[in-house]
Image (spheres, rainbow, N blue to C red):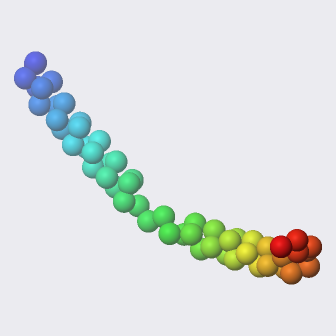
Amino acid sequence: MAALAWLLIPLFAAVGAAIWGGWASRNRTTGDVAELAGYARFRDAMEKAGSTGRNDG
């Protein structure tokens, strides 16, 4: 029975590594589009605020 336990430990480790590897390599590019659009809106707003704001320099 102890030999079976020692064989199951690497098996569980391999399954865990496979799950973690799949999770770590998942496709996460869907959020980038929204973030880039938000950044573009932020940049536009800052350019508009800079052109109408006071210039001390």
Instruction: Using the image as rendered, state which of residue 8 and residue 24 is in the foreground.
Output: 24
Residue 34 showing in the rendered view = no
Residue in front for this viewpoint, 22 or 7:
22
Q: Is residue 54 visible?
A: yes
In the visual, does 56 lie left or right of 11? Answer: right
* Picture layout, residue 10 above or below residue 20: above
Q: Residue furthest left?
A: 3
Q: Residue at x 23, y 36 (%)?
A: 12
Near-viewer residue (19 or 25): 25
Q: Position of residue 37 (x, y in %)?
A: 67, 75
Relative image position of residue 46 (x, y in whole percent): 79, 73
Depth check: 12 or 57 in front? Answer: 57
Q: Quadrant of residue 45?
A: bottom right
Where residue 30 sits, quadrant-wise, is bottom right
- The quarter in which the N terminus is drawn is top left
Q: Is residue 46 left or right of residue 9?
A: right
Q: Residue at horizontal 83%, vertical 73%?
A: 57
Tell which residue pokes out farthest to the front in this image. 57
Residue 18 x/y as whole percent: 27, 49
Q: In the rendered view, would you say 52 is above or below 1?
A: below
Q: Residue at x 21, y 43 (%)?
A: 14
Q: What residue lies at 50% left-to-right and 69% top-to-bottom?
A: 29
Q: Residue furthest top?
A: 2
Q: Tell me: 39 left or right of 21.
A: right
Number of marks in the rendered image: 0
